[in-house]
Amino acid sequence: MNPYILAILLFGLGLGTTITFASSHWLLAWMGLEINTLAIIPLMAQHHHPRAVEATTKYFLTQATAAAMLLFASTTNAWLTGQWDIQQMTHPIPTTMITLALALKIGLAPMHSWLPEVLQGLDLTTGLILSTWQKLAPFALFLQLQPNNPTLLILLGISSTLIGGWGGLNQTQLRKILAYSSIAHLGWMTLIIQFSPSLTLLTLLTYFVMTFSTFLVFKINKATNVNSLAISWTKTPIITSLAPLVLLSLGGLPPLTGFMPKWLILQELTKQDLPLLATMAALTALLSLYFYLRLSYAMTLTMFPNNLAGTTPWRFHTPQLNLPLAISTSATILLLPLTPAITALLTL
């Protein structure tokens, strides 16, 4: 892709998200989401592969449906209450509709079916943008909504953690596994959003750092399925030895960074007299942990098949920068001791 066009599209991505961040009016927020969607579509379809075009079409239809639903709900709210302000959503019907529209936009269960299919059709770089940056604008709106339907958010959250864990169990494609991982993490954020919005923000940022590391590890190995991870020993032994720690951090295992948000969320749910919900969430985390362990096993403890069909591919020097990977991997593995400082910041 022409670097000027790429720069314009990336600028559009940033502009759309910034407009949504800065808006207090539903029309302006909707406009930011639309700019965001339109900017990423050429990035998704840039390889002209039938699978990429199919993924782009699915993404466009899903996002257009969610945006139309959001616009309809905000217009209904203005008609019922005379308010266009995001923080003045008082009527339950438009609020529920907007919650469902945003859930469809980010891929919460049961509106999740598009996410694994779309992510599977993209290259790892665009997939990374879709899994991280594209979640920011809808979450900014989620955080501003006054939740007057707590049961809906809890149902969306617990079904997402369950489906995100269950769906990834039988996958062999890494991008689909990462999509189900995304659904599960978004479920954890939705569970806690009405009780502690700052904790949701912390979970979102931690998820971004961990996902960034995981995508870069897969990208540096040019790996797209579980079997292709087995050849990473010959190319990047140090990254391969650190990758299981990154994956287990995504799974939320102590003493890694990923344990911190899960620990704080379970603590907060228990404080809110929801011990059953906390137990269910902790059990669904075990499902996700299983497929992260599977990836770790494939990466570090298996040898690539030494037959004609499975010969090691040519090793070209990768142009990928190592500094972002080094920083994000360090953050993914080592931030748990900072939990007291982070919780002190959250309570300010």
Image (cartoon, rainbow, N blue to C red):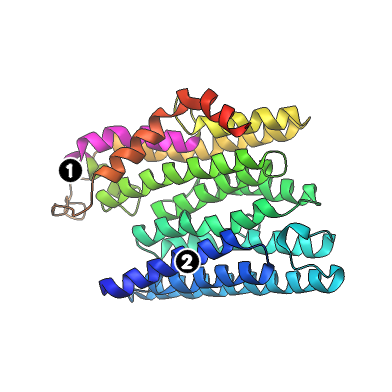
Q: Nearer the viewer, residue 239 or 283?
A: 239
Residue 234 among magenta residues: yes
- Going from the N terminus, do you reach mark 1 or mark 2 first? 2
The three-letter amino acid code for the residue at tag 2 is Leu
The quarter in which the C terminus is drawn is top right
Mark on residue 15?
Answer: 2
Q: What number of labels is visible? A: 2
Mark on residue 235?
Answer: 1
Mark on residue 12?
Answer: none
**Quarter of the image holding residue 103?**
bottom right
**Quarter of the image holding residue 95?**
bottom right
Q: Nearer the viewer, residue 190 or 236?
A: 190
Magenta region, residue range: 233-251
Locate residue 135, reporting x and y percent. Answer: 53, 56
The chief SS type of the magenta part is: helix
Q: Nearer the viewer, residue 234 or 80?
A: 80
Is residue 168 toward the left or the right of residue 100 in the image?
left
Query: Is residue 297 at all visible to an observer of this figure?
Result: no
Whole-angstrom CA distance, mark 1 to mark 2, is: 38 Å
